[in-house]
Image (cartoon, helix red, strand yellow):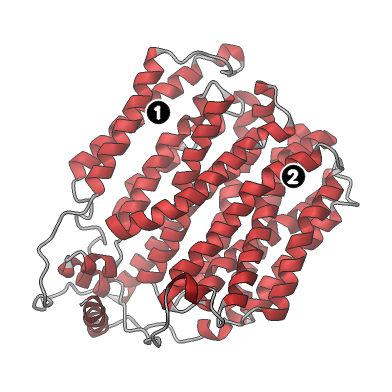
């Protein structure tokens, strides 16, 4: 019987869980205020912040600080040589498989919750616009604030993961998910924008941290990462559209934020199944736990790469400049489509006369796009990474172009095009992360992946105000063509100059079935740290 990957990995559990409890209590007070507005159709615009709400906001901040302090790793006595070998628990093949499956399942759930946050912005825009009396361009500041937060969050959480660990960063992001559900109780539009920025900060760092943790605990499984990326992106949008269809007509747009509270709390409860990276544990001096994790997950040696220059100079050097510019352009064009155009789909369908069924249409379209996303993972690993990116970029651009002739007031005609659009954008994002990681060597892989993520989110900062302004003066079809143009150009550049990485995905998976393999990996990791 194997043990859980978690063996007291929260350094100060009492402090951490006290912070979680205090923060949750502050959120609960905001929910009570929201419930009391039922007689006003849950409209809170212009309501004053009473003493109870200010106390609740203070509790949220205090809870976050306490939880963060509880996650700071304890200082361990560092030794210049590795400790003597200790007997390791035996792990059966089925037990190791269960650990891996459970890890992917929990981290996939984390990514779905993460993707729900920004995806929800698309479904609150119509209600927020009506309650606050805003124009399309003005209400676009909500997604701009959220996406600005994700860019900041990517930078902040990247540094945080190196200081307190991947696992601790995931837990802190999940607690910030809990705190930012109070977006639903903000009485002013300006306060909503501020909370959207904080929400974006929490969501921005989760995705790269999760992918880093999967790649470090389950190396050599790019197909799994591709499938996880695509399905969780679709899953987040699916969950947001489904909750909107079920609850928004009765409880208004604000309920969509509060409905994410139980999901974030479940993620915190599941923390015991999230391991820490063995390399991070060893770097902190926790060598015994690092060795145990290596054995539990059956890690083995990986081929060494030649030494190369690091940093931005290498990223933009003669050998990688072209690939960096192509990947950055592809990521930016995806951000314009997803965060710019797709964010306004509920508004577009509502103005076309399908307001009452817009959420249902998008929910069904998201559901039907899942098979296409699964195909992307298979094509990427079995066919060609470059051609798969080209295929899904083309599907995205063609679907946008089709909106120039499709009557959006007819659900029967619009749904197939929307399925194509959502399949294309989810396929692009599912392969973009693994592709970026495989293009760059280990020396600056993290920097390259971070730049790609920043570009995709920067597209979201630019996209909403641009699309909002265009929709104020142009038909939807023409707006779609404008957004499709950079996607088509980036896809053409990938097809012509993109680097093929599929051969790298066909290397045999590390056996990881022996105790000796885990020990060899640990010894190599220790030598690297020294």
**Residue 518: x percent and y percent?**
25, 79
Callout in the foreground (1, 2): 2
Q: Is residue 254 visible?
A: yes
At numbered mark 2, what does the secondary structure look like: helix, strand or loop?
helix
Q: Is residue 67 left or right of residue 173?
A: left
Label 1 residue SS: helix
Residue 85 to residue 458: above or below: below
Q: Mark 1 points at which residue?
A: 27
The answer to which quarter of the image holds residue 91 is bottom left
Q: Residue 4, how many percent across, how many down?
A: 25, 60
Rendered location of residue 136, percent (x, y): 73, 33
The image's mark for residue 467 is 2
**For the residues bearing labels 1 and 2, Cβ distance under 8 angstroms:** no
* CA neighbours of label 2 inside 10 A, class few (<14), some (14 to 19), many (20+): many
Q: How many marks?
A: 2
Q: How crowded is mark 1: few (under 14 residues within 10 Å), some or many (20 or more)?
A: many
Spot occupied by residue 75 in the image (x, y as percentages of width and height): 14, 57
Relative to 390, 258 lies left or right: left
Of the 4 image quadrants, the one containing the N terminus is bottom left
253 on left or right of 438 = right
Name the one closer to the observer, 123 or 370: 123
Seen at 61% across and 40% down, the residue is 143
The residue closer to the viewer here, 114 or 87, is 114
Look at 55% across and 86% down and name the residue there.
Answer: 503
For the C terminus, the quadrant is bottom left
Asked which quadrant contains residue 83, the reply is bottom left
């Amino acid at each position: 019987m194997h043990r859980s990957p978690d063996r007291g990995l929260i350094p100060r559990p009492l402090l951490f869980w006290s912070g979680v409890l205090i923060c949750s209590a502050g959120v609960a007070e905001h929910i009570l205020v929201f419930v009391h507005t039922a007689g006003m159709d849950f409209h809170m615009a212009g309501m004053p912040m009473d003493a109870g709400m200010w106390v609740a906001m203070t509790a949220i901040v205090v809870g976050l600080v306490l939880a963060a302090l509880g996650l700071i790793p304890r200082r361990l006595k560092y030794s210049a040589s590795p400790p003597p070998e200790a007997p390791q628990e035996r792990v059966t093949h089925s037990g190791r498989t269960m650990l891996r499956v459970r890890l992917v399942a929990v981290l996939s759930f984390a990514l779905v919750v993460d993707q729900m946050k920004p995806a929800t912005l698309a479904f609150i825009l119509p209600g927020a616009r009506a309650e606050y009396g805003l124009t399309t361009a003005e209400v676009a500041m909500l997604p701009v604030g959220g996406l600005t937060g994700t860019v900041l969050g990517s930078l902040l959480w990247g540094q945080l993961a190196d200081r307190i660990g991947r696992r601790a960063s995931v837990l802190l992001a999940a607690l910030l998910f809990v705190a930012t559900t109070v977006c639903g109780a903000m009485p002013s539009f300006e306060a909503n924008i501020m909370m959207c920025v904080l929400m974006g900060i929490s969501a921005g760092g989760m995705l790269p941290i999760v992918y880093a943790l999967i790649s470090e605990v389950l190396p050599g499984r790019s197909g799994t990462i591709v499938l996880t990326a695509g399905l969780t992106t679709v899953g987040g949008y699916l969950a947001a559209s489904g909750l909107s269809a079920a609850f928004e007509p009765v409880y208004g747009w604000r309920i969509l934020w509060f409905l994410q509270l139980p999901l974030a709390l479940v993620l915190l409860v599941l923390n015991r199944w999230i391991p820490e990276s063995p390399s991070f544990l060893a770097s902190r001096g926790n060598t015994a736990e690092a060795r145990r994790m290596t054995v539990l997950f059956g890690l083995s040696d990986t081929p060494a790469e030649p030494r190369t220059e690091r940093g931005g100079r290498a990223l933009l050097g003669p050998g990688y400049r072209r690939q960096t510019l192509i990947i950055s352009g592809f990521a930016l064009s995806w951000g314009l489509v997803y965060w710019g155009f797709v964010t306004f789909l509920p508004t577009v369908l509502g103005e076309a006369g399908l307001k009452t069924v817009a959420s249902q249409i998008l929910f069904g379209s998201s559901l039907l796009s899942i098979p296409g996303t699964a195909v992307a993972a298979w094509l990427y690993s079995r066919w060609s990474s470059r051609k798969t990116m080209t295929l899904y970029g083309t599907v995205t651009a063609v679907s946008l172009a089709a909106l120039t002739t499709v009557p959006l007031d007819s659900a029967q005609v619009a749904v197939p095009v929307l399925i194509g659009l959502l399949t294309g954008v989810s396929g692009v994002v599912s392969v973009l992360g693994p592709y970026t990681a495989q293009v760059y060597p280990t020396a600056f892989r993290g920097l390259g992946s971070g730049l790609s993520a920043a570009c995709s989110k920067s597209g979201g900062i630019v996209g909403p105000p641009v699309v909002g302004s265009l929709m104020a003066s142009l038909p939807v079809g023409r707006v779609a063509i404008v957004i499709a143009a950079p996607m088509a150009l980036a896809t053409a550049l990938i097809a012509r100059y993109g680097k093929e990485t599929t051969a790298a995905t066909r290397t045999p998976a590390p056996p990881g079935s022996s105790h000796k393999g885990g020990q060899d990996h640990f010894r190599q990791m220790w030598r690297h740290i020294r």
